[in-house]
Image (tube, rainbow, N blue to C red):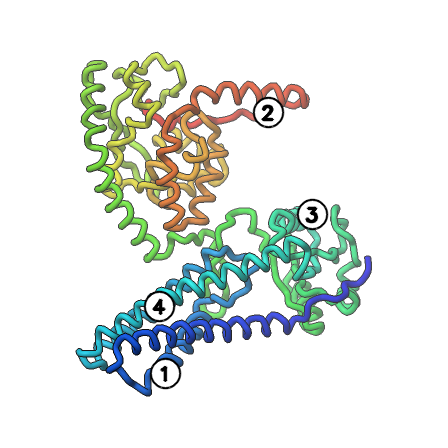
């Protein structure tokens, strides 16, 4: 293994960030001054020498806020949405403060002129700065995928599992632009070049000059880790740690501080933020009201059909487990004959309890419509993990890893798992994986996307294919001469 050569200079990053800041200032100033000149021509009576100074000050404040909200943070591991949201937030704050200032200090006869100028400048500035950022991300993405602008990493580890976990993320995301040159450790790690033992760490750092040193240990004493860190510090090498709990919960970590002691919050999610909770709840209230009005003819049709199809109530009420493990009553249109196994029985494609009309409304997901009232009450959300009956919650939480994490937020009428076809008689483990993915990566735009895609997946065809898929899995397992573990299936429909 040859020493790493022609690595990008570490100072290049700071030059690029400085250039990015200057470019943002120039773009914002050009747009603001351009509209100032335009409106000054339209309203020739307006003439303020101080306006150019104010424009420059506003552009400087905008650049400062970009930096404050991490718009200039490294783009390797962040999505475009991260930067777009922050640019939009900066412009909204700047617009609100500037508009307030205009109303306080500008004469009333000139207020309309300044307001028009501010609206136009802010709108086009948002578009241009966002387009520039996305263009930069796209260019860097292409360069890194093509092995340009690469950061070279030295891995210090004593664990095959930790090395595999780290390498899986690197290999699955080539756009991060990371290349692991090898590992340093006293144990054999398969799949990576062994550059030497930890006793040779100082020599290896001087020879290879890595951009970053990543340490991943299962169990190492503080005294030993401190020694490694000091060696890296003496060689001006940046050190990062992979926590040994990384496989437990993959949400973005939040570091809290108790005095001077840092603590990692392994359950930190976007919906811990009150603002995000408020946005989601507003979407639920407004969305459920609109959907109740729009689907009222369908609900009337379904109610009449249920009443005529078999004796019994129109609505089916069932206890489900919701947020923070609290039980609530969920409403559905009854699709089965009244029976004694409503709380624990399994639902299948040819279930004899289903009425013909019940089979129709379940196929078209019309039986779910009354749950809009659950959303309005606050028991449920439009989007989230599907709720389960208490009997199966107790069963699955003992058998499915991380199953109870779905109860950290309100259950939903639809969700990420449902638009991926994981409905009804499908694998619980696969569904929980999607639920956790949703919880960890929640965004308001993601909820809206799921709502828009749900009608395309409303026709319940899963029951038709579930048995075929299970047979194929069993045949594959027989050919491989191993016995598969028992698969658990969820009852997501009324029982």
Q: Tag 1's secondary structure?
A: helix
| Residue in the foreground of this view, choosing between 345 and 476 | 476
* Distance between the alpha carbons at the discs numbered 3 and 1: 61 Å
Give the quarter of the image for residue 120: bottom left
Q: Residue at x 38, y 74 (%)?
A: 34
Q: Tag 4's secondary structure?
A: helix
The residue under label 4 is: 122
The residue under label 1 is: 52
* Distance between the alpha carbons at the discs numbered 2 and 1: 73 Å
Q: Which residue is drawn at 45% across and 31% down?
A: 422
Seen in the picture, residue 311 relative to 198 is either above or below; the reply is: above
* Distance between the alpha carbons at the discs numbered 3 and 4: 52 Å
Is 222 on the left-hand or right-hand side of 339?
Answer: right
Give the quarter of the image for residue 382: top left
- Residue at the far top in the pictured view: 352
The residue under label 2 is: 484
């Amino acid at each position: 293994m040859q020493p790493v050569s022609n690595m990008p200079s570490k100072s290049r990053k700071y030059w690029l960030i400085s250039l990015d800041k200057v470019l943002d200032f120039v773009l914002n100033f050009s747009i603001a001054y351009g509209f100032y000149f335009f409106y000054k021509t339209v309203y020739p009576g307006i003439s303020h020498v101080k306006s150019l100074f104010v424009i420059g000050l506003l552009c400087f404040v905008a650049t400062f806020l970009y930096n404050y909200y991490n718009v200039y943070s490294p783009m390797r591991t962040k999505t475009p949405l991260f930067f777009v949201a922050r640019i939009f937030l900066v412009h909204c704050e700047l617009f609100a403060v500037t508009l307030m200032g205009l109303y306080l200090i500008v004469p009333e006869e000139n207020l309309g002129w300044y307001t028009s100028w501010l609206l136009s400048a802010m709108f086009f500035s948002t578009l241009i700065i966002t387009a520039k950022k996305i263009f930069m991300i796209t260019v860097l993405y292409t360069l890194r995928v093509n092995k340009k602008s690469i950061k070279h990493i030295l891995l210090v580890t004593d664990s095959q599992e930790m090395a595999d976990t780290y390498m899986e993320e690197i290999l699955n995301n080539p756009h991060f632009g990371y290349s692991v040159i090898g590992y340093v450790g006293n144990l054999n790690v398969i799949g990576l070049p062994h550059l030497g033992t930890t006793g040779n760490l100082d020599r290896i750092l001087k020879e290879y000059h890595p951009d970053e040193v990543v340490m991943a240990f299962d169990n190492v004493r503080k005294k030993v880790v401190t020694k490694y860190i000091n060696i890296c510090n003496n060689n001006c090498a940046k050190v990062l740690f992979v926590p040994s709990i990384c496989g437990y919960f993959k949400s973005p970590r939040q570091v809290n501080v108790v005095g001077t002691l840092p603590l990692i919050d392994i359950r930190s999610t976007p919906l811990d933020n009150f603002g995000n909770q408020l946005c989601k709840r507003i979407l639920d209230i407004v969305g459920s009201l609109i959907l109740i009005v729009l689907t009222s003819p369908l609900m009337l049709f379904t109610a009449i059909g249920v009443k005529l199809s078999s004796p019994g109530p129109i609505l089916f009420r069932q206890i489900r487990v919701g947020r923070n493990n609290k039980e609530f009553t969920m409403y559905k249109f009854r699709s089965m004959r009244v029976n004694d196994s409503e709380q624990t029985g399994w639902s299948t494609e040819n279930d004899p309890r289903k009425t013909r009309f019940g089979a129709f409304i379940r196929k078209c997901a019309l039986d779910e419509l009354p749950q809009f009232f659950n959303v309005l009450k606050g028991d449920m959300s439009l989007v989230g993990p599907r709720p389960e009956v208490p009997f199966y919650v107790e069963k699955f939480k003992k058998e499915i890893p991380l199953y109870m994490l779905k109860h950290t937020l309100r259950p939903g009428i639809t969700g990420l798992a449902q638009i991926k076809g994981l409905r009804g008689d499908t694998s619980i483990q696969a569904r929980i994986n999607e639920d956790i993915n949703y919880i960890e990566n929640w965004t308001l735009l993601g909820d809206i996307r799921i709502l828009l895609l749900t009608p395309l997946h409303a026709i319940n065809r899963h029951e038709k294919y579930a048995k075929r898929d299970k047979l194929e899995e069993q045949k594959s397992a027989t050919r491989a001469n191993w016995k598969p573990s028992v698969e658990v299936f969820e009852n997501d429909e009324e029982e």
